[in-house]
């Protein structure tokens, strides 16, 4: 590409690909301070006729203990089989980041994540797994699922 030629965000047809994805196109990232303020974005699944598994691996999840206010650290994995919509990864990152200052029990966090993600993309099947670091000598793992996993 010549030095003075700028890259265009438009496709060859002149249309902006995935116009509903607003978070990816921003030059400045705004971090929501609670899950209620976070925006989950989706895009059309290009292969809805096929059952294929998508895995998001998020090893740096943090939230606050609702009793002590101390930070809790966990590893969140989201596995799902999309139907018509897929979750956009930057919006998921910002959504999970929004728990950083949110007071919640681990069980509530995992189930809230499942509920919010399933509402956003209506998957055929979804599983959210949270492995939380020990507090008081006890580690905790929670797995929540929705739908029936295709065979």
Image (cartoon, rainbow, N blue to C red):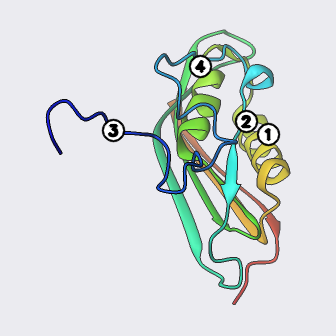
Side of 84 where 50 appears, left or right: left
Can you give x and y, in whole percent of width and height, for residue 17 in the image? Answer: 57, 50
Q: Position of residue 6 (x, y in %)?
A: 30, 33
Looking at the image, is mark 4 or mark 1 earlier in the sequence? 4
> Marks 3 and 4: CB-CB under 8 Å?
no
Q: Is residue 55 among what the camera can see? A: yes
Residue 137 in view (yes/no): no
- Which residue is under mark 3? 7
Quote the CA–CA distance across marks 4 and 1: 14 Å
Mark 2 touching mark 1, by CB under 8 A? yes
Residue that carries the numbered disc 1 in the rendered image: 112
- Helix, strand or loop at disc 2? helix
Q: Nearer the viewer, residue 101 or 116?
A: 116
Mark 1 closeness class: few <14, some 14–19, many ≥20 residues within 10 Å: some
Q: Are marks 4 and 2 in contact (CB under 8 Å)?
A: no
Q: Does residue 62 sit above or below 121 in this rendering?
A: above
Could you say which disc has been placed on residue 109 in the image?
2
């Amino acid at each position: 590409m010549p030095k003075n030629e700028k890259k265009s965000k438009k496709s060859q047809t002149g249309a902006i690909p995935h116009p509903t994805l607003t978070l990816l196109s921003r030059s400045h990232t705004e971090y929501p301070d609670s899950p209620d303020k976070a925006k989950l974005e989706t895009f059309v699944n290009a292969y809805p006729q096929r059952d294929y598994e998508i895995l998001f691996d998020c090893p740096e999840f943090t939230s606050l203990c609702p009793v002590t206010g101390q930070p809790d650290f966990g590893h969140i994995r989201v596995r799902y089989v999309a139907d018509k919509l897929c979750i956009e990864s930057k919006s998921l990152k910002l959504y999970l980041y929004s728990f950083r200052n949110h007071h919640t029990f681990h069980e509530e966090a995992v189930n809230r994540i499942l509920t919010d993600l399933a509402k956003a993309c209506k998957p055929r099947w979804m599983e959210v797994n949270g492995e939380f670091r020990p507090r008081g000598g006890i580690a905790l793992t929670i797995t929540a699922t929705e739908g029936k996993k295709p065979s």
